[in-house]
Amino acid sequence: MKNKLVILVIFFSYLIVNAQTRKIDFTQYDLSNGMHVILHKDNVLPIVAITLTYHVGSKNEDPERTGFAHFFEHLMFEGSANIERGQFDKLNQGAGGTMNASTSQDRTFYYQIFPSNQLELGFWMESERLLQLKIDSIGVETQRKVVKEERKQRYDNQPYGSILEETFERAYKVHPYKWMPIGSVQYIDQAKTEEFMEFYKKFYIPQNVTLSIAGDIDIAKTKELIQKYFGDIPKGVSDIKKIELVEPPMKEEVRDTVFDNIQLPLVLHAYRIPAQGTPDFYALDMLGSVLAGGQSSRLYKSIVDKQQKAVNIGSIPFPLEHPGLFIAYGITNVGISADDLEKAIQEEIDKVKKELITENEYQKLRNQTENDFVNANSTVVGVATSLANYHVYYGDANLINTEINRYLKVTREDIKRVANKYLNSENRVVLYYLPKSAKK
Amino acid sequence: MKNKVLILFLILFVSAASYAQLDRSKKPAPGPAPEIKLGDYESFTLKNGLKVFVVTNKKIPKVAFNLIIDRDPILEGKNAGYINAAGQLMRTGTKTRTKDKLDEEIDFIGASINTSSSGVYAQSLKKHVNKLLELMSDIVLNPNFTQEELDKIVKQTLSGLAAEKDDPNAISGNVKSILYYGKDHPYGEPMTEETVKTITLDMCKEYYGTYFKQNITYLAVVGDITKSEAQKLVEKYFSKWESKDVSTKTYETPKAPVINKVSIVDRSNSVQSVIALGYPIELKVGSEGAIKVSLLNTILGGSFASRLNQNLREKNGFTYGAGSSFSSDEYIGSFTASTTVRNSATDSAITEILNEIKKIRAEKVSDDELQLTKNYMTGNFARSLENPQTIANFAVNIERYNLPKDYYKNYLKTLNAVTSDELLTTAKKYVKPNNMHILVVGNGEEVAKNLSKFSVSNKVDYYDLYGNPVDPSAKKLPAGLTAEQVLNRYIEVIGGKENMLKVQDKTTKLSGTVQGMNLTLTISQKEPNKLYQFIDAGVFQQKVLFDGVKGRTESMGQVQDMPAEQLEEMKMQASVHTILKYDELGIKTELTGMESINGKDAYKITLTSPSGKKSTYFYASDSGLLIRTMSSVSTPQGTFNQTTDMDDYRDVQGVKYPFKMSQSFGPQTIDLTVTSVEVNTGLSDSLFEIK
């Protein structure tokens, strides 16, 4: 009898746990021009997030026009047939909104958040710049300068600012991931207005965009408005070609040193890994947490806390649509050499390859995963963004509710297996960042 | 049947027509403005004085606890950093849990707990909340400070300070605080390697023992939890926490400077300038002026569409972004306008920032701009409510700063009632375009010279990373180094004495532009001291001749013989290897310092001619090459300071010459590129002849 009660209690608490995870309901459909629409209603606050994910990023660029997708993103704020130059941000803010955009290797993302009574204004603005963007030479020349300052601010004038650029250009030889979305100054300088219009016609077409909306909306009314503003935008002439370039496997370790304006050396390992969404990627994501998720994680505990060789340490798979990189790095404590730190990191990596993680560690990992998953969708713009990403990359927006199962499916054996499969020296770039004063 | 078809047609027609009717030129009108409802909070106080606020929000199954110690700022003096260290030590173990155990237990439930000198923040899933509070209260009530953990923290802090030395934003923030508040104010005193090394365990223990008391603490509980649940938990875990009276502290109120002051931190490898303009200001949280000031700031620099960003980014393309902020504070607040711009735009950017600051103080804001800004801020307020911590912050602020209970409930009403007249009055009170610190962290060599105009005293003050005044020209010379060694090294790196002496004549051709005109320059020299120089700038031509004794300038039909003073200069310059003849010519050399020239450390050699005329030569400490000369040049038009920078040394028959030169002469700069150097072509004496 006593045993039965225990089982019942466990069963009960299990039910409660499940009930705690909020399910996110949504509606999705395609317009006749191919534009995909996702709607999520949340009436708690009178605000609405309108997001547009254009499936074009730096990997779609001409190698002689790197930085183009991002430069173009800046021009999307210039104006349209019915919105004068300089008015776009004023229209948004004047209606109580906020907005921004970002460009990654794989997509260009725009969002506006409005009080819910300004939903139609948002549709007008977004449909205008999808249908009839206007760019002139003043706008192009101004943004050319702005983008170059952005590059300096983020990459060139920051300690370690160039690290991803330096890593990716060594990890890829063929695939466009070898350059960063910010691109090179040379090509930012060369980009011409006509080229932007060609790019616009090619990539900014309804069948290449996902419109994802979350917040205080009425679903039926919103559908009507979407039809009104986006329904008559003509479908693009040709669909976008998939990138066929496949990066061949690395044959041997690439090892290099960058001399930067820094004080503390940094060591980085970047291993080539499969694309996001693959089973091995989930296992690698969890491996990243084993190594550096929280102060009890292996790299942190051993190298930062016990050996005091690093001030900062991290390990994370860089999520990309095509095969990407698993990055582990550390910044040395004062007086510690890069070699010394690298050895310490390598020891921990060798350990996860040799031995299974403990049952206790495994349970901790699952608890951490659950905590992170619950955290992810706390704002309307966060929900709209996640829905769009899951649709664009995996064709399944409902992963917003179910992706956690893919994580929880990962076993201890999987973690050891992927460590052995990918974290090998012939499959990596090793980069040292050293102070310029160390250059002979 | 027929009718039905007709109806169908009609519907099709109508619906098609309704699309065609969409008039895209018209901006759609908004629907009725929605009501923004502020969520409620509840509160209770423990017997010993802990004030607890609960905001229930069941959107996600998480709970967060934010514990805030409310004490006056503390001046740490020569031990600056010990308060931070005490805050970090809190997380390194308790009487019953080692750091390893604590880390393990926190991570195991997927939670996080952060500690600082002014409080503790903890969050987890609702199902782990009991365990979370057990750990959090253990940290707050029973921390165990050990020397071993302090040593680790000190080491980490020293590494952090080292890393900051190359972070221009960190440097700007540190030096700005020192300029605004002074080193004798808790907000201004710098933490340095020296102060951190003095921290002892006793200091940290004393800090904890004095200030971690429940009667001066607020606890905000936010998330999927009711008041009664929270009360049960908090009573269980915190009622044993002791109370003790804590003394208050007062400090002299920092003042804005009486005149504009320009300061620079020289970071020679900077490719951008980090600019900050501002001053300390008395502006209390929730004070009568705070909402108006916030409105004013949003117009000036508080959003993408603000005047500063539109001007510096969208109109001028100086920067990726520009903005401003007023911070309200119980003790002393501040105003700062800031941006990061390319080196060459540094002074223009400051000019534009000052223009916008002056304008907002001089002119009334238009009704349109005012209304749009109110709309924007209303939207911001609504969006901020998505984070349940916002309501908790409101609750704590009302209690902590003694604000009216309905301060935040009335926020939007108060905001929307502000008139443009009131805004102008506010600007006149809080905006001080003539009492500013103007701070630039950047490449001093490239940007400093254009900054003195912003300073009333016409002076630019240099500071190091810790806000100590420095003399920009003072760099430490290596011990024992002599002028002779520097000059000998130069002779050696450009090819050696033997090769230099082989050169008997030399013709250098250069091209460049000045004031938009193309210019070519031919200079011929012949041993021992003959010189011919011809400048051709199209409409303007000039010939200079020196035959070793006499000199002459011919330009546009005018002929002028050189005065004695200029002849002496010619004697020194005409030789193709003057440097080998210093003794013969009676030129004295002295190593007078070390300076940063275009980001390169360079030895400074002062040359004194027999008549006492001085010129300065700079030799790069790494390459040994001559990279700059400075002298005053007398011309028929008067005496000018002339600076010549040299770069791109190339070998011509065994001797290296600079192929790039940049010459500034008074206000003009000429960039010259050497197109050819020919040596030993057997130049005839007649070329130098003065008829």
Image (spheres, rainbow, N blue to C red):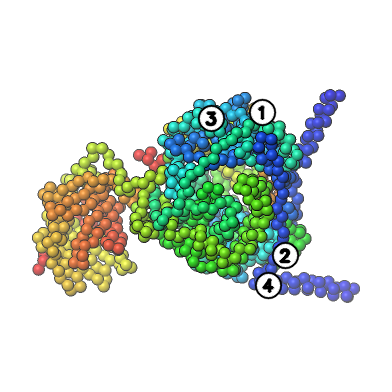
Q: CA distance from mark 1 to mark 3?
A: 34 Å
Q: Which one is in front, A341 or B511?
A: A341
Callout in the foreground (2, 3)? 3
The image's mark for residue B23 is 4
Which residue is identified by label 3?
Answer: B205
Q: Are marks 2 and 3 in contact (CB under 8 Å)?
A: no
Above or below: residue B498 compared with residue A220? above
Q: CA distance from mark 2 to mark 4?
A: 21 Å
Q: Give the chain letter at badge 3.
A: B
Badge 3, how many Cα within 10 Å: few under 14, some, many 20+?
A: some
Q: Identify the secondary structure beneath mark 2.
A: loop
Disc 2 marks a residue whose amino acid type is: Pro
Callout 1 and callout 3 share a chain: no
Callout in the foreground (4, 3)? 3
Q: Are marks 2 and 4 in contact (CB under 8 Å)?
A: no
Q: Give the chain letter at badge 1.
A: A
Left or right of B387 in this view: B514:
left
| Residue B87 placement (x, y as % from top left) | 55, 35
Callout in the foreground (2, 4)? 2
| Residue A6 placement (x, y as % from top left) | 81, 27
Which residue is identified by label 2?
Answer: B32
Q: Identify the secondary structure beneath mark 1.
A: helix
**Among the 4 quarters of the image, the one containing residue B211:** top right
Disc 3 marks a residue whose amino acid type is: Lys
Q: Identify the secondary structure beneath mark 3.
A: helix
Which residue is identified by label 1?
Answer: A360
Above or below: residue A103 compared with residue B58? below
Callout in the foreground (1, 3)? 3
Whichever of callouts 2 and 3 sits on the residue coming sooner in the sequence is 2
